[in-house]
Amino acid sequence: MPELYDIIIAGAGPAGLTAALYAARAGRKVLVLERDAAGGQILFSHRVENYPGMAEMSGAEFAIHLHHQVERLGAEVDYAAVTGFRPDGSGGYIVETEEGERRCRALILSPGASPRPLGLPGEEELVGGGVCYCAVCDGPFYSKKQVAVVGGGDTALQDALFLSGVCSQVTLIHRRDTFRAAPVLVDQARERDNIRMMLGCTVSEFLQENGLLTGLRLRTASGAEETLAVDGVFIAVGQTPGTAPFAGQVAVDERGYFLAGEDCKTALPGVFAAGDCRVKTVRQLTTAAADGAVAGLAAAAYAEAHAQA
């Protein structure tokens, strides 16, 4: 029988690590399981300026400090991909990983969500050098500069509106002739003098020099090409939640996000969902940390009650 933990947390992003922080402070025995590096998507933010109480830091710095803080409190962090879980027959759960099975009284799922890339050559290498996925996070770094937003949904229009207050020129690029976004957002964008809309266009190539984005090559529906000079591009074509390994056990919405409210509780007793992986309207570093605190304390209370049962 695997060693019993009070709480196992699947995912070591800001939500998962914050959950571990609060659960460990509550005196629980905690194990965090992570497939890749601790920190999640925040590792790709080269500067963070919107976390309360910290004027500026890199995403990597934030992740390292939080990771060390969690381990100093006695929580364990191990690197193994969680592939699923099942009831253990006594009210807890067996967590399945590529490295074997673990056992817990309460389970927190925090696999996060990753931005959907365009999939063009050089895209990954230009992250931090002009290719961005979060306007609120990275937009202020392009103050008074020319940028583009790629996408046609609510997120893309909201990004364009936000960036229009920061940047000198925003070009909104969408592959269709009409937007999927709410009409009110489209109307607001059309009223902004510094938002230019290019419909029926796709990005076919990132142009760069010395590792920095210098422009985009665009292709129209007719096949014609043109070059757009920009300092940055914000890609808003959707996100992919990391819920696939658990989708058959925990209810998800039509986009694959866990159905869990602000209390982070799923329909399964003792199973919680925290961070960008659950249904919510705002996905920021602060909201991930908030979810982690809520889920960590709730799981700690559940594990304590279950241990006494």
Image (cartoon, grey):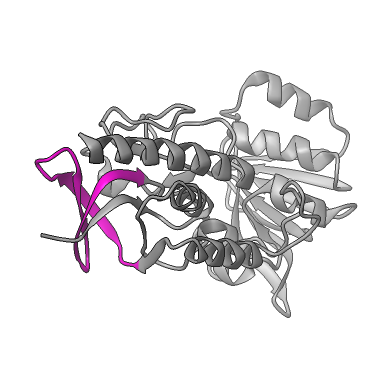
Write the residue at 33% across / 31% down.
Answer: 266
Q: Is residue 106 magenta?
A: yes
Write the residue at 60% across / 30% down.
Answer: 179
Q: Locate residue 40, reporting x and y percent.
A: 50, 59
Q: Quadrant of residue 268?
A: top left
Q: Furthest-top residue in view?
A: 184
Q: Locate residue 10, reporting x and y percent.
A: 35, 53
Q: Is residue 49 left or right of residue 221?
A: right
Q: Quadrant of residue 130?
A: bottom right
Q: Main secondary structure of the magenta part?
A: strand
**Foreground residue among 46 and 157:** 46
Quadrant showing the N terminus: bottom left
Q: Is residue 48 magenta?
A: no
Quadrant showing the C terminus: top left
Write the residue at 76% across / 35% down.
Answer: 161
Q: Locate residue 14, reporting x and y percent.
A: 53, 53
Q: Furthest-bottom residue in view?
A: 210
Q: Locate residue 189, reporting x and y percent.
A: 76, 30
Write the residue at 49% across / 36% down.
Answer: 294
Q: Is residue 82 left or right of residue 174?
A: left
Magenta stretch: give its range: 79-108
**Foreground residue among 160 and 62:** 62
Q: Is residue 150 left or right of residue 189?
A: left
Total numbered circles: 0
- Residue 60 visible, this orientation: yes
- Residue 257 visible, this orientation: no
Q: Is residue 55 left or right of residue 181?
A: right
**Foreground residue among 309 and 57:** 309
